[in-house]
């Protein structure tokens, strides 16, 4: 099974030769694409930042295999770009199958000793890693903003969110209990042992360059597994910095490896190896399906956190302020680039006009710009392909009769900035309702009855997150139970936390991450029957 040329991240990377200059790749083909007037200024600022990060030792530009920082075997590299300016932040190795096989061997060897440590020994190292992540919150946040674009405050929030998984699983490591089963025969004793799965391949996306890694690596390491992380080729720097801190925390060589580059080659090597016992992936449903098929060859375990199409239902009886605040947070977090972002705001007819008006006002007040500028709430989209996707969805909606209430085009800042957008009169026939837009566009749909809202909400192959806004307690229970989704926010738009299980139904994936349930994804259950108890 080959993954073909589809990148394992949500959107393909830009590759090229190594130059520390302005890249023209992001600004060559768009409509309103003058380089932002502030880019020369930002260039100096990010130059200073890059030097500061380099001297802190956290700007790593090599892969990590068996505790050593290494280049690609053929010396090939990829550029990491700042999406706000198009500048090249760094060049990292463009690795493939052979480096991945090295990483697999190193993880396989390290598994023997790491899995034999006591839970408390693993816990102490994870706790140390957590402390280091928190004490380097600022540098990690800066790296996230540099390579991913989200506003610095939001990036620091991601560091705290990401680190929380390491703290949580440092504690949970000590709670991997087995079981004793009452025997049916007097001379036997029956037990269940929980043991680590083994070597894990973790393939992670660009939208949360830290948190999607820690959410996987935390429980894996806590259980005694070892890991090969393949971060998105768009955002590898945060992953490398986190891995450096893991080494400093005393996590032994080979326990955590990082390879990046040719996504399909790396994915194929992980899938082909019988030594890799599990793949955990966050990304598109299309790639998730390929991984699922590819894992069949060696019957690997899988956790898949795939695309969503989150409905956000606002009932007539909702508190308007709560609904506006919650929908805004659910829609515009990370410029709309999360798989739990509200993708369809479904509003009851009695409150529709009032909601559309108040929501548009709130959206209008959001400042767009470089994530390092004070007060900015919306950064750029990750790359040109992302903007083109948003544009095509908006064009489709307008063509089919929707009305743009706000935004609806590229931002005058140029590059990959897009105006926060509100679109009314959206119908289920439009792309905006059918697929994940993954950008700052809020489509408003209208409904009459509760039954209709539930039908509309469930009319999708996805089933990750859903939100409802209502002041009626009975309705909140009824609708929550009827929604075919793995996560439901009631009168709340931000629901992700390390202590709760995160994952989807239907084609949004398999398994759960975070919480005590997230541990089970990395544990095998072994039944033991001890016979002949009465022998003297
Ligand atoms: C995601 O977008 O994949 C994760 C979002 C979250 O953890 O809240």
Image (cartoon, grey):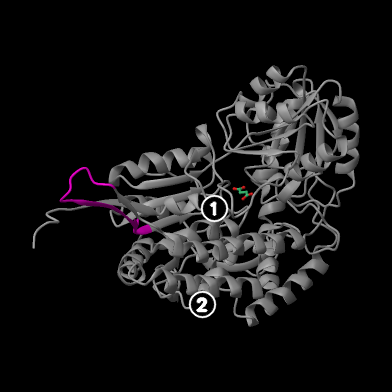
467 within the magenta span = no
Between 521 and 35, the one nearer to me in the picture:
521
Q: Does the magenta stretch include residue 186?
A: yes
Q: What stretch is highlighted in magenta?
A: 182-199
Mark 1 nearby-residue class (10 Å; few <14, some 14–19, many ≥20): many
Q: In the image, residue 222 lies at what x, y percent?
A: 45, 64
- Secondary structure at badge 2 equals loop
- Quadrant of the rendered structure where residue 253 is? bottom left
The residue nearer to you, when weighing 479 against 278, is: 479
Residue lying at 79% horizontally and 67% vertically, measured from the top left: 42
The picture quadrant where one finds residue 239 is bottom right
Nearer to us in this view, 515 or 339: 515
Give percent across and percent down for residue 345: 75, 31
User: Can residue 347 be seen from the camera position used here?
Assistant: yes
Question: Is there CB contact under 8 Å for labels 1 and 2?
Answer: no
Rendered image: mark on residue 249: 2
At x 64%, y 27%, the residue is 434
Residue 451 percent location from the top left of the image? 68, 18
Q: In which quarter of the image is the C terminus?
A: bottom left
**Label 2 near ligand 1 (CB < 8 Å):** no
- Is 12 placed above or below 66 here? above
Disc number at residue 68?
none
Q: Which mark is residue 515?
A: 1
Q: Earlier in the sequence, mark 1 or mark 2?
A: 2
């Amino acid at each position: 099974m080959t993954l073909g040329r589809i990148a394992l991240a949500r959107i393909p990377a830009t590759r090229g030769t190594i130059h520390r200059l302005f890249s023209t790749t992001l600004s060559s083909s768009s409509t309103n694409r003058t380089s932002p007037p502030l880019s020369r200024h930002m260039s100096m600022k990010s130059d200073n930042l890059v030097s500061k990060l380099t001297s802190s030792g956290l700007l790593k530009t090599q892969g990590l295999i068996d505790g050593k920082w290494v280049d690609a075997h053929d010396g090939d590299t990829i550029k990491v770009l700042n999406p706000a300016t198009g500048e090249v932040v760094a060049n990292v190795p463009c690795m493939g199958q052979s480096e991945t096989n090295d990483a697999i061997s190193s993880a396989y060897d390290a598994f023997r000793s790491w899995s034999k440590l006591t839970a408390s020994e693993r816990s102490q190292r994870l706790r140390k890693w957590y402390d280091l992540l928190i004490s380097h919150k600022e540098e990690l946040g800066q790296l996230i903003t540099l390579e991913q674009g989200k506003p610095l405050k939001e990036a620091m929030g991601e560091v705290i969110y990401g680190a929380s998984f390491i703290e949580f699983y440092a504690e949970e490591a000590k709670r991997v209990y087995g079981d004793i089963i009452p025997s049916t025969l007097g001379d036997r004793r029956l037990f269940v042992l929980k043991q680590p799965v083994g070597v894990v391949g973790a393939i992670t996306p660009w939208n949360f360059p830290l948190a999607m890694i820690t959410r996987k690596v935390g429980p894996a390491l806590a259980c005694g597994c070892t890991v090969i992380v393949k971060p998105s080729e768009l955002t590898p720097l945060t992953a490398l910095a986190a891995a450096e801190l893991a080494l400093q925390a005393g996590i032994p060589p080979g326990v955590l490896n990082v390879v990046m580059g040719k996504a399909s080659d790396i994915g194929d090597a992980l899938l082909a190896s019988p030594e890799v016992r599990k793949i955990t992936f966050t990304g598109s449903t299309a790639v998730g399906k390929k991984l699922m098929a590819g894992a069949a060859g060696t019957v690997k375990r899988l956790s898949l956190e795939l695309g969503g199409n989150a409905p956000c239902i606002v009932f007539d009886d909702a508190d308007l302020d709560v609904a506006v605040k919650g929908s805004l947070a659910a829609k515009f977090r990370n410029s709309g680039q999360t798989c739990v972002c509200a993708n369809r705001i479904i509003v009851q007819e009695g409150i529709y006009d009032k909601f559309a008006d108040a929501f548009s006002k709130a959206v209008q007040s959001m400042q767009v710009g470089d994530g390092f500028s004070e007060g900015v709430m919306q950064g750029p989209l990750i790359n040109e392909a992302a903007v083109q996707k948003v544009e095509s969805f908006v064009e489709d909606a307008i063509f089919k009769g929707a009305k743009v209430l706000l935004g609806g085009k590229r931002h005058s800042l140029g590059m990959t900035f897009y105006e926060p957008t509100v679109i009314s009169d959206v119908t289920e026939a439009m792309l905006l309702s059918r697929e994940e837009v993954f950008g700052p566009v809020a489509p408003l749909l209208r409904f009459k009855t509760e039954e209709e809202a539930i039908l509309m909400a469930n009319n999708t192959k996805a089933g990750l997150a859903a939100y409802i806004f209502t002041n009626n307690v009975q309705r909140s229970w009824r609708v929550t139970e009827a929604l075919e989704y793995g996560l439901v926010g009631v009168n709340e738009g931000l629901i992700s936390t390390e202590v709760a299980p995160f994952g989807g139904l239907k084609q949004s994936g398999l398994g759960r991450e975070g919480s005590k349930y997230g541990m089970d994804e990395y544990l095998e259950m072994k039944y033991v029957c001890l016979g002949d108890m009465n022998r003297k």
